[in-house]
Amino acid sequence: QVQLVESGGGLVQAGGSLRLSCAASGSIDNVIAWYRQAPGKQREFVAVIRSNGTPDYADSVRGRFTISRDNTRNTVYLQMNSLKPEDTAVYYCAVYGIGNYDQSTSYSHWGQGTQVTVSS
């Protein structure tokens, strides 16, 4: 059973950048997504990368965030640029199971999350 560990979160000023990593305990040549959850809000889709490397993004992050993968390192990345205070959340990576990519119920394995805080 694959285990996921996120890292790279932290405190950054608005307009700054962070790169999150999602390291898997085994091969992750399947679909992987990033989600985030802010206090008092539902977990929301951020980005997904398919097995062939094709990405997709939530409208709120498109043009600012980039998802990528390195299958040789069993790692998926989320490069976040031009960060805004509303990006503040715990960020999770997840392995796709079945269903729509933008629904959290479609994912079978989740990491513990990494906190991202953007100050204004």
Image (cartoon, rainbow, N blue to C red):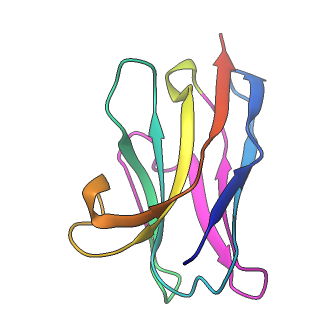
Identify the residue at image location x=76%, y=24%: 11
Magenta highlight on residue 69: yes
Task: Give percent across and percent down for residue 89.
Answer: 54, 29
- Asked where in the image residue 91 lies, by quadrant, the reply is top right
Question: In the image, is 48 to the left or to the right of 5?
Answer: left
Say if residue 103 shows up in the picture: no
- The magenta segment is 56-83
Identify the residue at image location x=64%, y=87%: 27
Task: Give percent across and percent down for residue 77.
Answer: 67, 62
Identify the residue at image location x=65%, y=32%: 115
- Asked where in the image residue 39 lies, by quadrant, the reply is top left
Image quarter of the C terminus: top right
Magenta highlight on residue 87: no
Identify the residue at image location x=76%, y=25%: 12
**Up-down: is 5 above or below 87?**
below
Task: Give percent across and percent down for residue 66.
Answer: 59, 58
